[in-house]
Amino acid sequence: MNPKIKFSHNYFKLSGVKKATLLSIRKIDNLKCLSADFLNYDTKYWNETKKTSEFYPLEYSKPHLILFFYAENKSDRSEFVGHIFTTIRRYIPQKEAYYNSLIGEEFDVIVKEEA
């Protein structure tokens, strides 16, 4: 059984991904060191009720982990197309150890809104 990575919203970055492999993780002590463009990319999702896009709020001054995932999706031309996406998660040492132990593993991608 694959580990699961859960998302609270249908983020644009996911593009319908159902399975993805964890490539790497990186600890960030303060999100203010990241560009606004990156943060917008990572946190933008569609709010179906309001019919508008929104951004997930983050606590900028606290440490976080950035997880890097790779998904391989079949295109309409029967070719495989790679899709890399990130997700920002709150940092705790146990979470860092957990994700480090799963680098290279395939995850089931679960979107809570769809569940």
Image: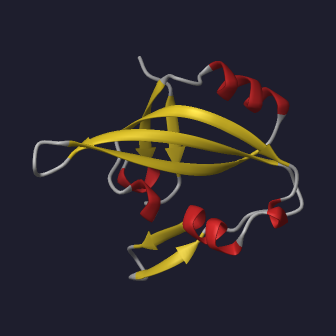
Of residues 33 and 88, the one drawn nearer to the viewer in this rendering: 33
Q: Quadrant of residue 14?
A: bottom left
Q: Residue at x 35, y 47 (%)?
A: 17
**Residue 74, position in %: x, y?**
20, 43
Residue closest to the far left: 77
Q: Residue at x 59, y 22 (%)?
A: 102
Q: Which part of the image, by quadrant, shows the N terminus?
A: top left
Considering only vertical position in the picture, is 83 above or below 103?
Answer: below
Considering only vertical position in the picture, is 89 above or below 22?
Answer: below
Task: Answer left or right for 50 relative to 88.
Answer: left
Of residues 111 and 86, the one drawn nearer to the viewer in this rendering: 86
Considering only vertical position in the picture, is 75 above or below 25?
Answer: below
Task: Answer left or right for 2 relative to 7.
Answer: left
**Residue 5, position in %: x, y?**
52, 38
Q: Residue at x 48, y 59 (%)?
A: 9
Task: Answer left or right for 104 relative to 74.
Answer: right
Q: Residue at x 53, y 54 (%)?
A: 8
Q: According to the image, what is the colour scheme of the structure?
A: secondary structure
Number of numbered discs visible in the structure rendering: 0
Task: Answer left or right for 29 relative to 54.
Answer: right
**Residue 94, position in %: x, y?**
79, 27
Of residues 47 and 88, the one drawn nearer to the viewer in this rendering: 88
